[in-house]
Amino acid sequence: MSGEETTILYVITDLLVGGVPLHLHRLALAMRKRGYRPTVVSLAPTGPVGDRLRQDGITVESCEGCCGWDLRVVSRLKRILRREKPDIVHAMLFHANVAVRLAARGGGIPASRILCEIQTVEVERRWHLTVDRWTHRRSRLTVGNSPSVIDHLHRNGRIPADKLRLVRGGIDPTRILEARPADRAALGVDNDAPIIFWSGRLDPVKGLDYLIDAFHSLREECQANLLLAGEGDEREVLQSKIEKLGLRDWVHLLGTRSDVPSLLKAADLFVFPSRTEGLPNALLEAMAAGCPIVTTNVPGCRDLIRHKENGLIVEYGDASGLAQAMRRALEDRTQAESFGKRAAADVSENWHIDKTNDTYAALYDEVIQSS
């Protein structure tokens, strides 16, 4: 059984705008094009990504959970599993993984038909690893999207290697390659001023506080502008820091943007100073754009960037080292551009979404054929 005969029930913690929900959106559409029949269930209310899925013709349901540990979602999920009787259940994010493992037996789904997916190297809530270690046997495999995620789950979560599967993440670079550079005047940037760019979620784990410190040091020698695209809980903290350091005219909080490819094309440098990642789409997009990159020596980022080959790597939290690397990239444009070209080639060769979807489809067929 494969393709059009196979029903897949995707279960996710929530469908707010973020890396994993957007990944699920792309995956569900891609699998439908290949003939699979996807349905999506969110533990929480469906949210904006749920709305997008419905607009694209994907059925979306909610367990109406009010928080991460609303145990009522388990019984609600059991009822959905009994009714839908999917061929495969594919869960994403920690709470969804645990809920599926708990609900599956009562919902009539054998562990051999369950895939659970983790897309980050968890450093703040390490108890997640303990729960994964206790419950992973109630699923066939735990999927990770980068070598760092797989290594973390094996070494720190002590999940056996034969219960883990790498499905490399990827992006479609077409929209980025076709984008035209954003208008610098509309961004409030002089034509001769270098643009340093970052995009993502405004969250402490992203290292934006020390990026601003590094930029403050850099401004003493280089009349650059720092553009931060995205929203999140840390916005007010960052705004206060920008004001305190007197950087209001040079650091721009752009908010949520739909033109990130154009911003990447206008940027002279992309800086991504995270504390940890799984496989960051923002970094993949910057690579696809051929943008010179400075990032941190942490899981996820070091899966993509090789120091002095396709970008520069610094240690997390080292604002002085980050400023030095940024300065080097802006001063040696020839070297920086060569790094950018190598990074763009790497995306095409190793991190293209078509390869990702091929691997998922092969995994789904493996599950069906061997169950």
Image (tube, rainbow, N blue to C red):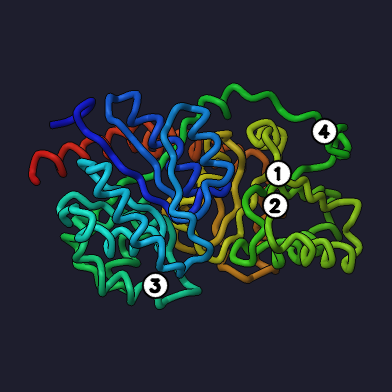
Residue wearing tag 3: 128
Is tag 3's residue or tag 4's residue first in the polypeptide sequence?
Answer: 3
Q: Is residue 349 above or below residue 329?
A: above
- Check disc 1 and report the residue beneath it: 256
Q: Which residue is mark 4?
A: 184
Q: Amino acid at mark 1?
A: Thr
Q: Which mark is residue 337?
A: none
Residue 346 visible to an observer of this rendering: no
Question: Is residue 317 shown to the viewer in this render?
Answer: yes
Gap in Å between the C-alphas at discs 3 and 1? 30 Å
Disc on the earlier residue, 1 or 4:
4
* Mark toward the start of the polypeptide (4 vs 2): 4
User: What distance separates the C-alpha of mark 3 from that of mark 4?
Assistant: 44 Å
Name the kind of residue labelled 2 in the image: Glu
Residue highlighted by disc 2: 231
Disc 1 to disc 2: CB gap under 8 Å:
yes
